[in-house]
Structures are given as structure tokens and as C-alpha cells.
Image (cartoon, rainbow, N blue to C red):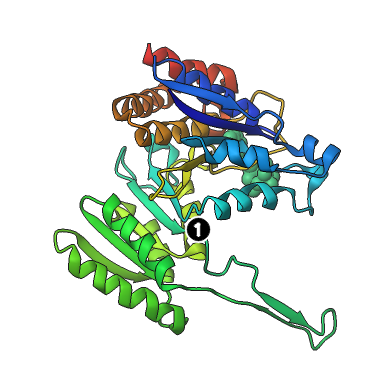
Amino acid sequence: MTRITVIPGDGIGPEVTEQALLVLGAFDLGLEFDVLDHVNAGTFLETGVALSEVDLERIAGSAGTLLGAVGDPRVAGTRYARDVLLRLRFELDLYVNYRPVRLLDARLSPLRRAGRREIDCAIVRENTEGLYTDIGGALRSRTEDEVAIDTEVTTHLGVRRVIDYAMAAASRAVCMVDKSNAVPNGGRVWQRLWRAACAERPDLETTHLYVDVAAMRLVQDPTRFEVIVTNNSYGDILSDLAAELAGGLGTAASVNLNPGTGFGLYEPVHGSAPDIAGTDTANPIGAVLSAALLLDRVGYRDEATAVRAATDRAVADGRCTADIGGSLGTRAAGEAIRDLLA
Ligand code: ATP
Ligand code: MG
């Protein structure tokens, strides 16, 4: 049996995770689910601990984690969400954030010309360095002479390994996105390692775009991209842009991955959405498609393909939640996908 840890988490997390697990349950697979029900804001409020050492070991020893969402208004401004997500990301060195961007149905795209299936690419975001390391400081805080500095960290190893992953993930084309014309120091590292990687893969179409141009091209013609590789902050921004082009927050899936160990933290792109928690209205598709990414990675490619096909079919038939034009609740939308797998 392959052991998968599950963190339903907060807000709509448990609701969408339940549907993802039911979809996985439609197959007779050698997967065992180890549910960490207690990793949530309620526990943090009671005990002050977000993720214990014991939890961390249980997670690290599993083949991957399915996560719903972490975040709660009662713990806003505390280190809670950071403790759970960043701790897992750094301790397990999940240096790739992989987000497939696939248009489920033409009517979901705000792009006038988007045809069904024409948007099918992936964003590979560097997940451990860049601008998000909290290195920097502030001087003369709260005065008119205030100065604040956030340092962007770019390492040879960090850039090389994420470019390597993107190259391996592509079958046709990779586009590297940076801003080396304006951010020259880190930019030189990206440029040099990118050129070296391109030289090793003459079979791929390799292109480079500055991030401003990449944003424009994604809206103009997303069909030209297969894999986009970029740093932490540009990846953050471009993947939300791309998610919206392909159907919205409720349908977007992701995995935080260490390609070396194979461990992945699979999670929908949306957060805990406290405004709709408990109302049976959350779209379960982001969680379901994240579970499909897990199936891909633990050796069940056919099943993953079947889940994606069933999801497309359910959406095409309008058997989905209100955020994407249907009228079903969370449970019924999950059931619609399961029906199509039976
Ligand atoms: P967090 O702090 O955990 O990120 P958030 O308040 O930022 O939570 P998000 O989950 O990021 O909330 O989503 C923003 C809004 O988008 C939500 O308030 C909700 O209205 C909507 N939304 C998010 N996810 C879904 C979903 N799966 N189905 C339907 N609507 C959603
Ligand atoms: Mg959010």
C-alpha cells in the first residue's frame, strides 16, 4: 500500500478534500489514506502548535500529502498558516510549484477566442527562494524617512534544479520568464543557466520572455505555451493570471514537489474561503484535479486521465457549482464526477 497523508485543514478545505477522496475511492487502488484531522486553526488556537514534530514525521514518511486549505480569520496575522505551509515547503524542500493550466470548457474562459482545450500549459514556479525568503529589514520605521528592503535571493542550485525540472516536464516547448533587463544580478544567473540547459535540449523549442511581455502573451495567445519556468514572485502572479484564463480559482490545481524524493504536497490553488465555508457551495474541482496530479505521480496515470476526462464532461454538461455556471452544491458536483467514472 502507498500511504498518502491528508490534511483537510480549514474553511472549505475539509469540504473539497472529502470530494477529492471520494473521487479517488471510485478506483480500487493500493492507496491508504492517513488523515491528519487535527492540523487546523482550531488546534492552533487551543495548543499554540500548528504542526507538531510527530505530524511532520508522519507526513515526511508518506508518499505525498493531499491538503485542503489552511487559513482562518480567527488566526489572521499569526504565524499559523506560515507555520504549516512554509514549514512543509522548506523542511521537505518542495522546490517546484507545478500548476497545470488547462481550459476545462471554452465557456469558462474570459478570452473571446479561447477554444476548448486550446489552453493547456503548465507553470513551473521556483518555490524556495527569490523575493519570498523574508530577508531584509526596515529603517526609521513609521517616519517620513522610512526605508524598507526585501532581498531577492537567487542561487545557482535553486535556478538550475527548477530549470531542469521544467525541461524534463516538457515534450515540446519551454519558455523561461525573468526580468533580467531590470533585475540584473539574479537575472544573469537565470540567463546563464537557461542557456546551458537549452544547449542540452535541442529537441525542445526554447524561448525567453521578460515577465511583462509574458503576461501580455498569456492573454493574447495562451495556446503558444507548453511549460513556463520562472522565479517565485513572477510564478505567483502569472499562475493566478493563467488560472483565471482557464476557468477560475475554484478549478485550479497545484503540487509543491521535490522531484528528487518524489514527495508532493497536492493542493487546490484557492484558499480556505471562509465566506463560503459550510454552505456546500465550494467548487471541489481544484481539489479533485490536485488529486489527479497525485495519481499521475504515484503511478496511476490512466486513472488520472479518467478523472480529468470525467471532470471535463461534468463541466461541459453544466453539472458543476455556481462559480463556473452550474447550480450544484459541493457534494453533488463531486458526485457528478464520480458518476462519470463508474
Ligand atoms: P485564504 O486566506 O485561506 O487564502 P481567502 O479568503 O484568500 O482564504 P480564497 O480561498 O483565496 O480565500 O478565495 C477568495 C474567494 O474566492 C473566496 O472568498 C471565495 O468567495 C472564492 N472561492 C475560493 N475558492 C473557491 C471555490 N473552491 N469555490 C467557489 N468559490 C471559491
Ligand atoms: Mg487567498
Give coordinates of residue 30: x percent, y percent.
Answer: 40, 20
Horizontally, residue 94 falls left or right of residue 340, namely right
Give coordinates of residue 45: x percent, y percent.
Answer: 83, 40
Count of residue discs: 1
Looking at numbered disc 1 in the image, what kind of residue is underneath it? Asn
Q: Nearer the viewer, residue 312 or 78?
A: 78
Could you say whether the residue bearing mark 1 is in a helix, strand or loop? loop
Give coordinates of residue 252: x percent, y percent.
Answer: 48, 41
Q: Quadrant of residue 164?
A: bottom left
The extreme left residue here reads 203
Quarter holding the N terminus is: top left
Residue that mark 1 sits on: 127
Q: Nearer the viewer, residue 95 or 337?
A: 95
Instruction: Give the residue at x 33% y 28%.
Output: 300
The extreme bottom residue here reads 145
Q: Can residue 222 be seen by looking at this rendering? A: yes
Above or below: residue 309 compared with residue 121: above
Instruction: Give the residue at x 31% y 41%.
Output: 115
